[in-house]
Image (cartoon, rainbow, N blue to C red):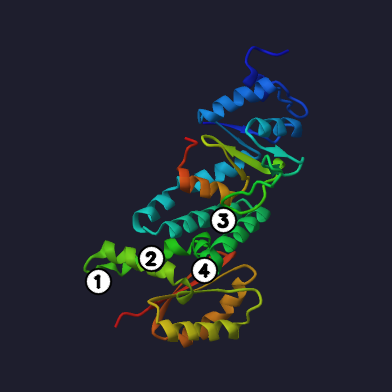
């Protein structure tokens, strides 16, 4: 699986990507279409646009931290081979 | 100049400043995302560190002997703590500790620290030494490991900065008298390692039915007290 780093991607491009996936942003946090902050399902914290991870399949957006990513691997296995 | 490939333009096309993606770029990305051929991440180092632990030989070893999925996950997080510690990534280390504590409480964090500090692998080594006395050694080893993780506070003291030598002795006395563990451990990292060194003689006097095996590397001090076989 290809991994694309969002580190050098503009905020506008990240928001465009989120909108195409059915989300939006206030420029800081990832929001759902009702304007509610999207919560990382493993770490139980709101996800910032400048620190997000987007995993494939039934799109999962998480905070970029070791706990959330390890939890994702526990649930779905190592899909990055 | 743009090519006919919106993906390569989007990823490689800009060498200075921030990448700007067109709607065409994003549509192409999303198609690959839906086909499970692509993922996005702010910092790819995070995935690299986690995958390295997930696929490590040490985790695979533990997976053979530990069936409890929560313990295995806490062990994997402990390996990640160890990696972050070795890379001196203090902020990420503290962030992960806090998340483990929030989700799994102090016992969960202690299981991860048990691995981070290199205690579990040495502990299993000591258990293996004693397996020759067991009727069914593999079953016994699995049971011993899971019992220890389940009741970790009955087997170990993690020495904290606020403790004094007298606190370590008092707490050790209570744990050993209440639980009579086969192996009792006192563990600390610098600057608490000095406290442990000062506790060795009083602990040896207290735990006369135990023999001491000491692991020390300057940064960490771990005392394994093994109950003598009678």
Residue B228: percent from left, percent from top = 35, 80
CB under 8 Å between discs 1 and 3: no
- Mark 1 — residue? B133
- Chain letter for the residue marked with disc 1 in the picture: B
- Chain letter for the residue marked with disc 4 in the picture: B
Q: Residue at x 45, y 58 (%)?
A: B70
Residue A72: percent from left, percent from top = 52, 46
Q: Secondary structure at mark 3?
A: helix
Q: Earlier in the sequence, mark 4 or mark 3?
A: 3
Q: Badge 3: how crowded within 10 Å, few (<14), some, or many (20+)? A: many
In the image, B47 versus B104, the foreground residue is: B104
- Mark 3 — residue? B81
Distance, label 1 to label 3, CA atoms, is: 35 Å
CB under 8 Å between discs 2 and 3: no
- Mark 4 — residue? B107
Horizontal side of residue B180 vs A13, given as left or right: left
Q: Which mark is residue B146?
A: 2
Q: Is residue B158 visible?
A: yes
In the image, B229 versus B11, the foreground residue is: B11
Residue A37: percent from left, percent from top = 69, 47
Distance, label 2 to label 4, CA atoms, is: 13 Å
> Is disc 4 in the same subunit as disc 3?
yes
Q: Nearer the viewer, mark 4 or mark 3?
A: 4
Distance, label 2 to label 1, CA atoms, is: 19 Å
Q: Badge 2: how crowded within 10 Å, few (<14), some, or many (20+)? A: some
> Is disc 2 in the same subunit as disc 4?
yes
| Placement of B154 over or under B209, stated as above or below | above
Q: Earlier in the sequence, mark 2 or mark 1?
A: 1
């Amino acid at each position: 699986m290809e991994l694309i780093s969002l580190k050098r991607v503009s905020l506008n491009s990240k928001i465009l990507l989120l909108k195409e996936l059915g989300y939006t942003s206030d420029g800081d946090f990832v929001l759902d279409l009702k304007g509610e902050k999207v919560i990382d399902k493993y770490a139980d914290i709101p996800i910032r646009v400048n620190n997000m991870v987007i995993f494939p399949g039934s799109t999962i957006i998480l905070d970029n931290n070791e706990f959330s990513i390890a939890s994702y691997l526990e649930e779905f296995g190592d899909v990055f081979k | 100049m743009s090519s006919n490939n919106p993906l390569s333009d989007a990823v490689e096309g800009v060498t200075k400043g921030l990448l700007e993606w067109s709607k065409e770029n994003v549509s192409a990305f999303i198609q690959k995302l839906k086909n499970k051929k692509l993922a996005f991440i702010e910092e790819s180092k995070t995935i690299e560190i986690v995958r390295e632990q997930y696929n490590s030989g040490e985790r695979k070893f533990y997976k053979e002997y530990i069936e409890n999925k929560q313990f295995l996950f806490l062990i994997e997080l402990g390996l990640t703590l160890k990696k972050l510690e070795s890379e001196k990534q203090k902020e990420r280390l503290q962030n992960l500790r806090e998340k483990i504590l929030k989700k799994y409480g102090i016992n969960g964090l202690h299981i991860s620290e048990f691995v981070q500090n290199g205690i579990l692998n040495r502990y299993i080594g000591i258990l293996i030494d004693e397996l020759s006395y067991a009727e069914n050694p593999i079953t016994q080893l699995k049971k011993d490991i899971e019992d220890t993780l389940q009741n970790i506070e009955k087997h170990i003291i993690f020495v904290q900065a606020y403790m004094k030598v007298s606190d370590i002795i008092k707490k050790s006395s209570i744990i050993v008298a209440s639980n009579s563990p086969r192996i009792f451990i006192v563990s600390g990292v610098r600057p608490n390692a000095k406290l442990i060194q000062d506790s060795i003689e009083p602990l040896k006097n207290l735990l006369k039915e135990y023999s001491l095996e000491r692991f020390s590397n300057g940064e960490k001090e771990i005392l394994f007290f093994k109950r003598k076989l009678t």
